[in-house]
Amino acid sequence: MQYIQPRPSSIVAALYTVRDLEVDVAILHGPSGCSFKHARLLEEDGMRVLTTSLSDNEFIFGGQSSLEQVLRYAEARFSPHRMAVIGTCVSMIIGEDMAAAIDSAEITTPTIAVPIHAGFRENIAGVMAALEPAADAGWISREELERQRFLLDKANEVERLRGAASKPYIEPSRGDLKHKVASRLLQLADEGAHGVAVLNAKKETAYMFADPLLALHDTCPLASIVYGANLEDRGLPKVRRDAARIREGMVTGGVAPVFMGALDEYGANGDLVGHWLQEQAPAFALLAGVPHAVPRDYTDGIEMFSITNGPRQVEPLHDLGHAHVVVEVDLHPKTLGVRAIVESEFGAVLRSLR
């Protein structure tokens, strides 16, 4: 499909992936402004992001010496456990050999080169560009590499079929009014309707998407509601640590969910969650994170409450028959660098109504 709306960048996807691989320092080999916003956000999450700051002169004559200098500086300044050099459009177009620069820099820090640019329609190219050299370096197993490849394909499939990539253009929306959605949710719970609340979130976004489930339990502790969450212990190192912290936070908050998949399996969880919904036969269901992973066949006849952080996900969710869709605005920046569950806007509204 030819998209005419902005799509995630494969360069940024590579940056997030090396962070999940416990890279301490990532070096963007390109102009200083490349991926600036996300580089700043990732620094909030504890990873140093440097740049070789290539200018028009290096566009012509090459920037290998600049990369070697930054590699040596990064090692001396930060004493990192691991480093990664991330390509950009400029360095890839001029044919920079980043692996050769790593060798020539004579550093001792384990470092991988990630040859990537932004010219891919699907950002998962950036993820695989980082994972493949990580597997070659022994940072992950070949089995984990293939597992990640499968999960990325499933996540991509969900976006094409029922997500923000399902149409050439989708009008952004802030979703339904949170206080009205929260009022209806509480009404159903107070009336004794049987419900389910499921966290099916992507990686660190679960730090906030878990909160509406806690808020629902806080406000309706005796309601007929069962909980589920994709918090099983699988995935890249940071993903597993995040899942453990969120599991602990939910249990401390009084919610003991049924575990359904891991934090990186959100795109592959649709049938698993869907079958569980059918077994529970609820009158209503709250899905937080990636609600569109669940095919419509499983949700017809259920009053659906969906929480997303994608303004372009509202229309597709309504098209799936979800009666109530709310958006957690700026969720991702609020979940970078955190180590405990963060209160959501919808959770705060729920609590305020009590």
Image (tube, rainbow, N blue to C red):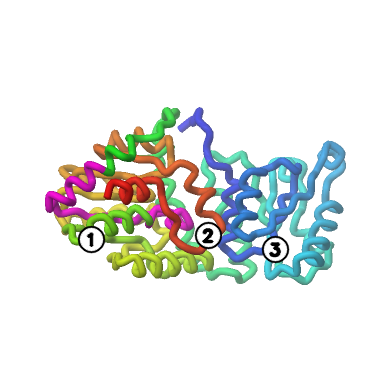
Q: Which of marks 3 and 1 is nearer the N terminus?
A: 3
The residue tagged 3 is 83
- Give the amino acid type for the residue marked by disc 2 in the picture: Val
Place of residue 10 in the rendered image (x, y in percent of width and height, measured from the top left): 58, 46
Left or right: 156 as drawn, with respect to 317: right
Residue at 35% across, 33% down:
315
Residue hosting label 1 = 221
Q: Where's residue 212, x and y in %? A: 34, 53
- Label 3 and label 2: CA atoms lie apart by 22 Å
First in sequence, mark 2 or 1: give its number: 1
Alpha carbon separation for disc pair 3 and 1: 47 Å
- The three-letter amino acid code for the residue at tag 3 is Met
Magenta span: 183-210
Residue furthest to the left:
192
Specify whether 336 is left or right of 301: right
- In terms of secondary structure, where does tag 3 sit? strand
Q: Which of 70 and 129 is in front in this view?
A: 70
Q: Can residue 79 be seen in this view?
A: yes
139 magenta-colored: no
Helix, strand or loop at mark 2:
loop
The answer to whether 52 appears left or right of 13 in the picture is right
Q: In which quarter of the image is residue 134?
A: bottom right
Tag nearer the camera, 2 or 1: 1
Amino acid carrying mark 1 in the image: Pro
Mark 3 or 1: in front is 1
Question: Which residue is denoted by mark 2 in the rendering?
Answer: 338
Q: Alpha-carbon neighbours of circle 3 within 10 Å: few (<14), some, or many (≥20)?
A: many
